[in-house]
Amino acid sequence: MALIPFDDRDGFIWFDGKMVPWREANIHVINHGLHYGSAIFEGERAYEGKIFKTVEHTNRLFKSAGILGMNITFTPDQINAAKEDALKANNLTNAYIRPVAWRGSEQMGIAAQATKTHVAIACWEWPSYFSPELREKGISLKTSPWKKPAPDMAPCHAKAAGLYMINTLSKHAAEDAGYIDALMCDYRGNPVEATGANLFRVKDGVIRTPKPDCFLNGITRQTVIELAAKLDFALEEDTITMEDLKSADEVFITGTAAEVTAIGKIDETEYQVGPVTRTLREAYESLVRGKSFSKSAAA
Ligand SMILES: Cc1ncc(COP(=O)(O)O)c(C=O)c1O
């Protein structure tokens, strides 16, 4: 299937307060965000016309901006309304939504105090990050040679564009080796994430996920932790070592794009898609669509 380039599509993008035709949502090449990575973004999904956790995503956008010292001149309410307007303008009810903010062209160089922060919101149809067949058998991960930096080495709690440089390198290395995604370890060498999703491991019925002390505390991660509590699963937030992963009964990842996705293989170790992953996946898929879910019905 031919890819449609993202700068040559029909539709509208909300751009600094105005809805502009998709192909006209452009910026100048001399731009601080592009040259120095001073950009932040969000990834959200709308299900049946309702944006899941829109307020939480907007709050994280402002938090990321604050961490990078960027001043968004719109209010969170304006951004929330803009997301709805963008969905309507594009006639979308099930969609991926991408708000992005970046420093402009007013100042060029490392210092950026005189730059203005611009904001755009695009949305498009994006059914499932991984195909249904892959989701059913679990995706494969290859451990990345790149490590997530320590909290005093990078603004790791911001969803900052620059931080994705190592994720892209990692994903390319994994794909080149025939895997679907990369497993990212933190600076201590403990596995913490895929390239766009948080990591969970299940052993003897107990779910474990690392504390987000040097990586994004995903909104899906927080949602799944709440779901696990409601469904009476034992869950601990603690370090997962490579050995813990090897001996796991089930491994899964969570993210807005990936939702709840089972892992079928990490490096040479293979895993079954188990009952805990299946239950949480169904519970999450019900929740985002505003449907009720009962563990006994799923079991
Ligand atoms: C590196 C990384 N970790 C984790 C996540 C999961 O975050 P969320 O559940 O908020 O989408 C994402 C996705 O945004 C991500 O890019």
Image: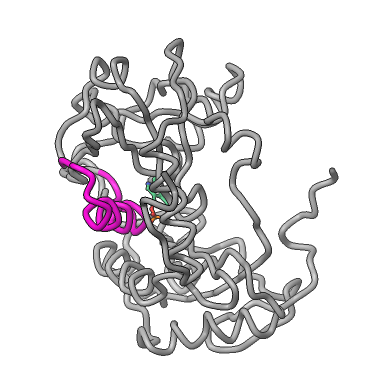
Q: Relative to 65, does residue 74 appear above or below in the rendering?
A: below
Q: Relative to 248, does residue 109 appear above or below in the rendering?
A: below
Q: Residue at x 40, y 39 (%)?
A: 277
Q: Is residue 270 left or right of residue 211?
A: right
Q: Residue at x 16, y 31 (%)?
A: 239
Query: Residue 146, located in which quarter of the rendered image?
Result: top left
Point out the image quarter for the N terminus.
Answer: top right
Q: Give residue 54's position: percent from left, percent from top.
A: 41, 74
Q: Relative to 215, does residue 83 appear above or below in the rendering?
A: below
Q: Give residue 144's position: percent from left, percent from top.
A: 41, 23
Q: Residue at x 49, y 25 (%)?
A: 264
Instruction: Residue lying at the far right in this picture: please name it.
Output: 2
Q: Relative to 95, does residue 14 appear above or below in the rendering?
A: below
Q: Which residues are magenta?
A: 215-236
Query: Residue 191, located in which quarter of the rendered image?
Result: top left
Instruction: Residue lying at the far top in this picture: please name it.
Output: 268
Q: Residue at x 18, y 26 (%)?
A: 188
In reply to whether residue 273 is colored magenta, the answer given is no
